[in-house]
Amino acid sequence: MWRELFNDFLQDLNAQRTRAFLTIMAMTWGTIAVVLLLSFGDGLGTQMLNGLMNAGNQIMILYGGETGMAYDGIPKGRRIHLSEEDGPMLLAAIPSIAQITPQYRAGVRLAVGKNSTNTECEGVDPNFEEMRRMYPAAGGRFLNAKDVAGQRRVLVLGDEIARDLFGTQDPVGQTVMLERVPFTVIGIIQNKIQTSMNNGPDSRRAIMPNSTMRTMFGWQHVNSLVVRPGDPARQEEVKKEIFRVLARKYHFHPDDERTLFIWDFIEGEKMSRKIGTGVAMFLFGVGFLTLLIAGVGVANVMYVVVKERTREIGIRLAVGARRRHIHAQFIFEALLLAVIGGALGMFISWGVIAIVHLLPSDDGAMRFLGKPILSVGTMLLTGGVLMVIGLLAGYFPARRAAAVDPVESLRYE
């Protein structure tokens, strides 16, 4: 039966080459539209999410504010200054916190020979590497516990700062003068995209041990505390606990939201994922409409085929063919048109995506747009839509063909 259906399809294809070609091209173009829109949308969403997480990998940055409510006889407007000791206290009091690091910050001047530049310098501990995705390039390293314990004068530099100071030389192991104090460069931060920044990109940043910076500048208070929950889904619970614990130490009302400012990267990640899903749905809708129009074209072609072959259908019914055989014939032909067009569309889309991946993406718009991602989910979704459209495009013409009266069809010219 299947061989007969396929032979009928080839005969019809050979008899109406132009019509079949245009129909297949319409399905091909619709498939290209769906696959490319979804792939580019997926690539854009992934790049934007990576850019956000490169600035803060499932963390919350905690800043001191000022009281907005009078509490326990103390008037409002009192400034809250966080200290480095608050980190271990919060870590011990709140089991939901996995990591916490102090963060000192200051503008400094770096100099190597005749080359000099001003940049943002941060004093942190080794946990900062994973929390801020400050991964060192090959040949270097990030801060370790010995650097912090020994208050070592070591620096990790952003890649742009390193180029400004050392040019094409390898900076690792070299000496940099920071405010006229010698520091040894131990690592260079890998180049990365950032869509969120805290006083500038990490590529123009210098990192030293928090103990070194505290001693060097004589500070008693930190600029912020970087907190990473063990379970990102429990960040709201962690926030409430932070307010509760610090309210007890600094004597403010636990519900006074002005006392602490929390920059929540986890909430930003959730929002970014929702935006990415919305963009993907919109792009799929645009591509689906294109594919649907192509499906309507297939249905119209099948209606024409039914009309042209009315006499043949009547003869088949008259000699004993069952109506389900007529149904199967036209549904099969419509599905084959959809499958051939879809296969061509996916192949062309794969080729376009492969070419785009060869283009440089380190600078310009491609750095932020990202590269398209042709996922298995995209292919399965497109294939499923193609099958449904092909099935519907063949079903209604097939139903009309099966309803033909054999006696009347034999008179049809």
Image (cartoon, rainbow, N blue to C red):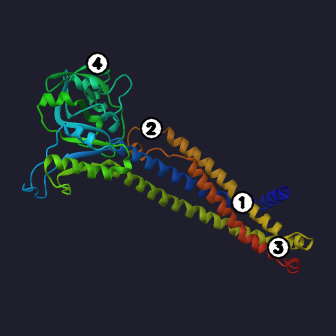
121 and 118: which is toward the camera: 121
Q: Which residue is mark 3?
A: 310
Above-or-below relation of 104 to 212: below
* Mark 1 element type: helix
- Residue type at mark 4 is Gly
- Residue type at mark 2 is Pro
Q: Residue at x 24, y 26 (%)?
A: 148
Q: Residue at x 68, y 66 (%)?
A: 393
218 and 205: which is toward the camera: 218
Q: Which one is closest to the eye, mark 2 or mark 1?
A: 1
Above-or-below relation of 279 to 137: below
Q: Residue at x 29, y 44 (%)?
A: 94
- Residues under numbered marks 1 and 3 in contact, where contact means CB atoms less than 8 Å apart: no
- Residue type at mark 1 is Leu
- In the picture provided, is 346 more to the left or to the right than 203? right
- Tell me the distance, in whole angstroms, between the alpha carbons under discs 2 and 1: 40 Å
Q: Which residue is mark 4?
A: 173
Above-or-below relation of 409 to 52: below
Q: Is residue 223 visible?
A: yes
**Mark number, residue 360:** 2
Q: Which residue is mark 1?
A: 335
Q: Is residue 154 visible?
A: no
Q: Which quarter of the image is occupied by the N terminus?
A: bottom right
Q: Quadrant of residue 149?
A: top left
| N-terminal-most mark, 3 or 4 | 4
Q: How many marks?
A: 4
